[in-house]
Each structure stands twice: as structure tokens, then as C-alpha cells.
Amino acid sequence: MANRRLYKVVFLNHGKVYEVYAKSVASSELWGFTTISGLVFASSAVLVDPAEEKLKEEFGKTQALHLPMHAIVRIEEVEERGTAAIRDGTSGEKITPFPMPMRPAPDRS
């Protein structure tokens, strides 16, 4: 059985940190860019992660991402796929792609 490589790619996009998994990472034909292709998404229909679904919606039909080198934070070669995520660029907390329930206003009486 062939050794299949898998990469975790962390990059910045519009003030957010994206963490995606891909089968291929290479230098792009475009100067100053890195090509990420073969994006891998979770295929479980039982558990639905909203962040994973947002990434799948945004990049599901993408054949290859050409990312500027300065936007890439880290590329790791990993043995197995983890959880893809979108994080806040400053705090590092996971971003929920749908609105959180509002808290009741404090009583000011």
C-alpha cells in the first residue's frame, strides 16, 4: 500500500485563521504563491460540525487554492486528519459560523 501524505495547512484569510487538510502542497506556477489541492473534509453524516460545514461550503468545489506565501502560517505533514476549523485572528478562539444566542440584558433597576 502506498504511503498517502496528508497536510494540515494553517493560513490567514480576512482576519481569520483557517485550518484545512489537503492531499497535496506544492510551489505554485504563480510567483509568490503556494498551491494547496485535494482538500479533505469530514464525511460523517452523524456528527455535523458547523465550522467544517462552513469550510465545505466555501471550498467544497475548489480544485486548488493558490495562497500567497505571506498568508501561510504553518504547513504540517500529519498521519491522520483532525478537525478543520476557522479561528479568530487575534484571540485564536474557534468561530461559530452561525449567530450565538443573545444573553439577556442585565437588570438595571
Image (tube, helix red, strand yellow):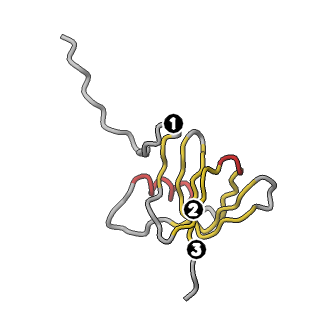
Residue 52 image position (x, y, % from top left): 45, 57
Judging by the rendered image, the residue that carries numbered circle 3 is 5
Q: Alpha-carbon distance for marks 1 and 2?
A: 21 Å
Question: How many residues crowd mark 3 within 10 Å: few (<14), some (14–19), many (20+)?
Answer: few
Left or right side of 51 for 107: left
Ranked by sequence position, the earlier of labels 3 and 1 is 3
Q: Amino acid at mark 3?
A: Arg
Q: Amino acid at mark 1?
A: Thr
Question: Where on the picture, by quarter, is residue 7?
Answer: bottom right
Residue 20 image position (x, y, % from top left): 54, 58
Residue 65 image position (x, y, % from top left): 66, 58
Q: Kindly identify the residue that appears in the image at 23 percent across and 20 percent down.
A: 106
Left or right side of 7 for 88: left
Judging by the rendered image, the residue that carries numbered circle 1 is 90
Question: How many residues crowd mark 1 within 10 Å: few (<14), some (14–19), many (20+)?
Answer: few
Q: Kindly identify the residue that appears in the image at 64 percent across and 69 percent down.
A: 24
Residue 87 image position (x, y, % from top left): 48, 45
Q: Looking at this view, name the residue that lies furthest to the bottom.
A: 1
Label 2: state its secondary structure.
strand
Left or right side of 53 for 22: right
67 to 60, vertically: above or below: above
Question: Where on the picture, by quarter, is residue 47?
Answer: bottom left
Label 1: state its secondary structure.
loop
Judging by the rendered image, the residue that carries numbered circle 2 is 76
Q: Alpha-carbon distance for marks 3 and 1?
A: 30 Å
* Viewport quadrant of the N terminus: bottom right
Ranked by sequence position, the earlier of labels 1 and 2 is 2
Q: Amino acid at mark 2?
A: Glu
Of the two numbered discs 1 and 2 in the rendering, the one whose residue sits closer to the viewer: 2
Q: Kindly identify the residue that appears in the image at 57 percent across and 81 percent down.
A: 3
